[in-house]
């Protein structure tokens, strides 16, 4: 065994949830070692369901139809949504791939009215500065057709606010840091799967990225320093009088090139 | 009408595909104006299908089960896949939300064997340098349990390679630049939806981000300067002897916090 690869100081132990990795000690980025299992992690056969061609075509058409109905919706009903559904949707988002299987995401689901209101106060205060100053005329104008502004009523009204945090690094049981490769890309991919899961059950959201609100929201929600807010999604049924801007999507030929 | 908002030089015209935006002229970032419609873009009622609670619960469970079966697969069968299915999958990815509805993505689908081989040569050459030098021991070791290296046989074998490019800015009909807000986040969200669409039809992939290969691949595929490679997905059926590392996913309670 090539011992130069291993950190020889702490005794080896294994985290009961997450497999650990073998690394060489370099500056302060040390992780604990699993002496036996890691390099020998089993590789197991994988054979998922296979559909006949006709079924593949139909399934792909149906899923396209489902997802093409999805729109960003800013008018959300206060009607309650079953908690189990939200949990399944988040659990589905957690099936996304991630760099080195680090799963660098935390989904904070807020239904408490007082906390939602605090979130709204923080977001609207920052968004007003964004719209009036930081974003600049061009950005404000590019959004004009969407009729958005700094008032975000849905933050009080929607039964759930889902705040998606990226874990910029992990914390191991021995409190050392763990690298989270491509954490932002991974969390955004996870968000895409979350949107599909919401659309699948008839819930709506707006995929917002509130500029400059991250640190305040992190503190409000008592998230640790390694987590950074990436997106805020209010979730619920659409309001009965919900509207959307009459935008069109690009044709397939405008987004796909075949070689 | 507040004419200071408008660029008064070119005559107004409307792009037949994509709605344009009104902006003030600031330095060189000018877009053409639609004099009539843009600020008056209609907002139309939106009422998608609504499911009874029991159906929502079941749909969310079923979709979770489907997506939880998804794994990253590096052993892909050469068996052909219907082109229509790939097109529907890409079309579905194109339903993702995007900053200011800019839809800043190009999906290059490669089935030509010679081009796939050229892609493989480029990727393996760079990946060998990555694994031997650029990534560093820690990263290489963090991947050890996944048994990856710089040999990427799937690039020749998979019936399709899907290269996802982000458009860092748009080009308008008058050749001026158009800002693509949050283009990387938008394209990654789109990728998440693409992965769901692939899983839905029984196809597999590996969501790879080949380090340092972007510029060479952009030139090989003749993509314009505003496009940057974000991800490369080989797509096909799993090989009959495909294996996956025996990794586990985090429990729901480890990724979701409820307030």
Image: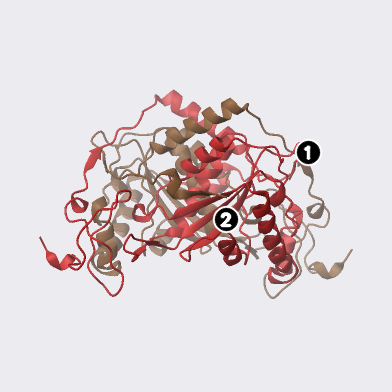
Chain colours: A brown, B red
Q: Residue at x 69, y 68 (%)?
A: B135
Q: Determine whether label 1 and label 2 are within 8 Å by CB.
A: no
Q: Residue at x 44, y 23 (%)?
A: B54
Specify whether B202 is left or right of B23.
right
Q: Judge whether A27 appears above or below B82 on screen.
A: below
Q: Is residue A31 visible?
A: no
Q: Nearer the viewer, residue A174 or B191?
A: B191
Specify whether A202 is left or right of A197.
left
What chain does badge 1 belong to? B
Q: Same subunit under labels 1 and 2?
A: yes
What chain does badge 2 belong to? B
The crowd level at tag 1 (other Cα within 10 Å; few <14, some 14-19, many 20+) is few
**Residue B203: x and y, percent?**
62, 38
Specify whether B147 is left or right of B258.
right
**Residue A240: x and y, percent?**
25, 33
Counting residues from the start of the chain, the first of labels 1 and 2 encountered is 2
Q: Judge whether B20 appears above or below B213 on screen.
A: above
> How far apart are the two marked residues, 1 and 2, measured between alpha carbons?
25 Å
Q: Residue at x 72, y 69 (%)?
A: B129
Q: Nearer the viewer, residue A248 or A36?
A: A248
Q: Which mark is residue B241?
A: 1
Residue assigned mark 2:
B231
**Residue B246: x and y, percent?**
74, 44
**Residue B163: x and y, percent?**
57, 53
Secondary structure beneath dot 2 equals strand
């Amino acid at each position: 065994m090539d011992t130069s690869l291993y950190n020889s100081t702490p005794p080896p132990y294994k985290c009961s949830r997450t497999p650990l990795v073998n690394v060489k000690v370099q500056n302060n980025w040390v992780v604990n070692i699993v002496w036996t299992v890691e390099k020998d992690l089993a590789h197991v056969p994988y054979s998922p369901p296979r559909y006949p061609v006709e079924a593949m075509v139909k399934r792909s058409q149906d899923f396209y139809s489902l997802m093409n109905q999805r729109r960003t919706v800013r008018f959300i009903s206060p009607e309650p949504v079953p908690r189990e559904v939200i949990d399944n949707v988040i659990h589905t988002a957690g099936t996304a791939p991630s760099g080195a299987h680090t799963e660098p995401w935390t989904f904070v689901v807020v239904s408490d009215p007082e906390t939602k209101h605090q979130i709204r106060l923080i977001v609207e205060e920052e968004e007003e500065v964004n719209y009036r100053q930081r974003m600049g005329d061009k950005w404000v104008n590019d959004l004009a057709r969407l009729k958005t502004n700094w008032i975000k009523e849905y933050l009080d009204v929607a039964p759930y606010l889902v705040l998606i945090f990226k874990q910029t690094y992990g914390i191991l049981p021995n409190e050392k840091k763990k690298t989270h490769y491509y954490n932002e890309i991974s969390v955004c991919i996870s968000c895409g799967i979350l949107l599909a899961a919401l659309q699948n059950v008839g819930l709506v959201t707006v995929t917002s990225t509130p500029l400059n609100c991250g640190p305040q929201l992190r503190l409000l929600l008592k998230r640790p320093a390694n987590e950074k807010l990436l997106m805020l999604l209010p979730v619920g049924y659409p309001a009965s009088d919900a509207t959307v801007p009459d935008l069109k999507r690009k044709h397939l030929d405008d987004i796909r090139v075949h070689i």
